Amino acid sequence: MTHDLLLDAYAGLTVRSGLNISPGQQLLITAPLDAVPLVRRITEHAYRAGASLVTTIYSDDVTTLARYQHAADDTFDTAQAWLFNGMAEAFKGGAARLAIAGEDPALLSGQDPRKLTRANKARSLAYRPALELITGFAINWCVIAAATPAWAKSVFPELPEADALERLWRAIFSCTRADLPDPVKAWEEHSAALARRTAFLNERRYAALKYSGPGTDLTLGLADDHVWKGGAGRARNGVICNANIPTEEVFTCPHKDRVDGTVCSTKPLSYQGSLIDGIKVRFEKGRIVEMTAAKGEEAFRSLISTDEGAARLGEVALVPHSSPISASGIIFNNTLFDENAASHIAVGQSYTENIRDGGNRTQDEMAALGANTSLVHVDWMIGSGALDIDGVKADGTSEPLMRKGEWAI
């Protein structure tokens, strides 16, 4: 298939399987400027599916970098609250949300870390009203990616820019199943397989997960009344959607106070324009009490100091080492893809859907069950072909769950 045909298939898959746009529903898209051709295809498919209005907000790496190079120091505690409040109002009104990733993973890696810390905290505070609607699964939403020149060069630095861009697009089409004869049907079958996995885990009712591997010796307690999720899910507005394309994970809510031990990252983390690698942390009673990173340590330290909940876990996800993204052999320097190549954890905010009847519980009730609260939610990868995971039952007995990165069940 030609690039144009694959791009159109990817756009159609995003609208139908990712978002599942409802007739009359508005759609809000955020995307990098280099994603314009994909946004145009998605917009066309969305209107054909019955969308009433599609609005796109574009970002630009050059102007983002210009702020850190030239803006006055006293402006970095400022964020566009008016924009995020407007997004929250759109979601409250029923608009669907599509985020297209593709920014330069290391755009801000050479900038003043104090400015990054202040700007990220200000943004997190301003974005909170919209984030709560996303993590609460109030609407149908989806995150996908578009290949961009800067991102492609970070993944394939040995290739000329045009070749790197083409190779990254091909990898995206393959990992998202957009290159199959019927991508929508393929996603239905994939979601069904993930649903079977979550059904098994929900039946087992593990109290904790025990991780063992190089540099990792971690006991991760699960929240009381936790629920495993994976693949397509029903948002509170009744629409069934896939929040991530691609996705290979099954995930649930850790207990914010019951994580102890050490764990190491196995893939780089791209966070707010900084590339962070070689993360090593130690948890005590759910909180990170020691941390180092081989690269981007200051950025990671800034992340986990955003607020009290940022140094605790809000998500745990299991991914087999043989997933299509892992099998590609590519390190994408993009969390959307790399998190689906390896089991991972996320610091910060918990998802309401990972607690039974979470949408009807108060914040205090959620906290009592172990759910975490934070201004941030950031995944980082800890899985590999050398990682073993046991499921620990309430009586303390355990059974193999994953061995050498693969399912043992």
Image (tube, grey):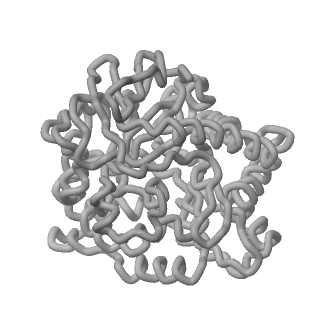
- Toward the viewer: 7 or 267? 267
333 sits left or right of 310 in the view: right
Q: State whether residue 379 is above or below residue 76.
A: above
Q: What residue sits 51% from the left and 45% below the top?
A: 228
Q: Nearer the viewer, residue 196 or 153?
A: 196
Q: Position of residue 342 (x, y in %)?
A: 48, 31
Residue at the (61%, 72%) spot, across then down: 237
Point 29% across, 60% down: residue: 367
Q: In the rendered image, which quarter contains the N terminus?
A: top right
- The percent coordinates of residue 157 (x first, y second) are 48, 30
**Quarter of image, res 117:** bottom left
Q: Is residue 262 left or right of residue 49?
A: left
In this view, the residue in front, 200 or 294, is 200
Q: Is residue 396 above or below residue 87?
A: above
Q: Is residue 106 visible?
A: no
Using residue 68 as the reference point, say whether residue 350 is left or right of it: right
Query: Can residue 239 be seen at all in this image of the molecule?
Result: yes
Q: Residue at x 26, y 34 (%)?
A: 295
Q: Position of residue 168 (x, y in %)?
A: 61, 37
Picture mark count = 0
Q: Nearer the viewer, residue 233 or 151?
A: 233
Q: Can you say which quadrant of the picture contains the C terminus?
A: top right
Query: Residue 248 placed where, x, y %?
Result: 58, 38
